[in-house]
Image: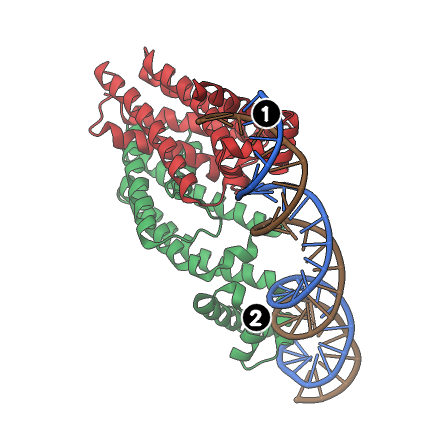
Chain colours: A red, B green, C brown, D blue
Amino acid sequence: MHTEAKDEMRDKILEAALKRFTHYGASKTTMNEIADDLHCSKASLYYYFPDKKAMHLAVLERIAESYFQQMEKEAAQVKSASKALYNIIDLRKDFISKFCRLEIFQILQDNSALFLEEKKKAKQREFNIHTEIIKAGIVSGEFKVKDPAQTAELLVLATMGLRFSVPDHIREDMDMDEEMMDQVIEKQKQLLDIFIKGIKA
Amino acid sequence: MHTEAKDEMRDKILEAALKRFTHYGASKTTMNEIADDLHCSKASLYYYFPDKKAMHLAVLERIAESYFQQMEKEAAQVKSASKALYNIIDLRKDFISKFCRLEIFQILQDNSALFLEEKKKAKQREFNIHTEIIKAGIVSGEFKVKDPAQTAELLVLATMGLRFSVPDHIREDMDMDEEMMDQVIEKQKQLLDIFIKGIKA
DNA sequence: ATTTTGACCTTGAAACTAAAAAAGTCAAAA
DNA sequence: TTTTGACTTTTTTAGTTTCAAGGTCAAAAT
């Protein structure tokens, strides 16, 4: 069927784009370069993606998907809700370390409706995963929480917020050196310590 | 004595500058305009301040000082440590609502050594105030905390971080509408609820 | 029918430039 | 010691050009 081949080519494009992005950064990568890597014409790319932004978004979605799947796996096979929450902090670190190299943010950092939409959906998915973990913690008797969804949202927001408040300067493109990142992770775990005590049964 | 008169003029300048900043924004205010408001020459301003940035910094320090004094007052007369922490959230809101209008950030948002220095000192002062409150809470038997300074820092960072993670977009100039601000405050208070439970004796 | 492409058009980000505005200086005056 | 007018220097703004990169399309290839 035609759509299979089409999807395959789409994947090849995303793969090539991802390779370029990780090596040179998204902002320094042109459509022509990606096309050349694939030994095809630039016009072909536009047969699979309406425009450059859509392609960037697709690359981001691809990485995000694997991130969320890892998180969901962690949430599903949870034996200790607390442990799952700690593990997610490490997962998130790996994800951010990986995708911040793509410099894909500078390029998507317009507040286009489409991008905000995706961002919102991703946020919601992260909330949901945390909600499930907290619910599991309630069932197992670890936690005592009135509104798991609200509590999960709060935890995610507070944790994410530390990425901005811990560094002395704030740049949306969020380039952090390893050292800064480690400081953030440390604070996130400290906060989680107290947060967990705060919702203990 | 000569320094008294000099300080008085300095104050007048800062007052005039503040007035302009609140009305038109710091970035739209020129040294000439401030001088004209004071019916003096621009050169006079340079007798009291080495340059424009120093003046902006002095204005900011002036506002910050009153903010910290309110906070310190709150910390000193604390009967309930928890209550003090809640009150500080409201104090901070008022402060931010006020000084964000000055647009003084865009202008100081270079990462000049001097500005970062002041920022760091302000952060430290806020940490110290919170540390004192938490220590008071320990003394009164409200809290049980191993390292009050670390805990205070964490609380401040987590609270501040919500200002960045709650909104969907992040802008350093931190212009927020009232509605956004209220959402942040709400999350800050929710977090404080759990945080306090997490450090309860 | 679907996919690919070369040739072409359009757009937006740098790279200059000139003019204006604002920052900053200083010797002399108050 | 403080103030200032007249001055120089720096920064911002607006206008222009240019060119690389984004994007389109009719025709060709599969």
Please tell me whether mark 2 or mark 1 is closer to you in this view: 1
| Label at residue B30 | 2
- Mark 2: few, some, or many residues within 10 Å (few <14, many ≥20)? some
Q: CB under 8 Å between callouts 2 and 1?
A: no
Q: Secondary structure at mark 1?
A: helix
- Mark 1: few, some, or many residues within 10 Å (few <14, many ≥20)? some
Q: As shown in the figure, which amino acid type bears the numbered disc 1?
A: Ala
Residue A166 in the figure: left or right of residue A38: left
Q: Are marks 2 and 1 on the same chain?
A: no
Q: Please provide percent x and percent y for residue B62.
A: 48, 60
Q: Please provide percent x and percent y for residue B192.
A: 31, 37
Res A86 seen here: no
Q: Which is nearer the eye, B169 or D19?
A: D19
User: At 38% from the left edge and 50% from the top edge, which residue is drawn?
Assistant: B72
User: At 51% from the left edge and 62% from the top edge, which residue is drawn?
Assistant: B59
Q: Which is nearer the eye, B57 or B83?
A: B57
Q: Residue furthest left?
A: A146
Q: Which is nearer the eye, A156 or B81?
A: A156
Residue A24 in the figure: left or right of residue B189: right
Q: Is residue A187 above or below residue B66?
A: above
| Label at residue A16 | 1
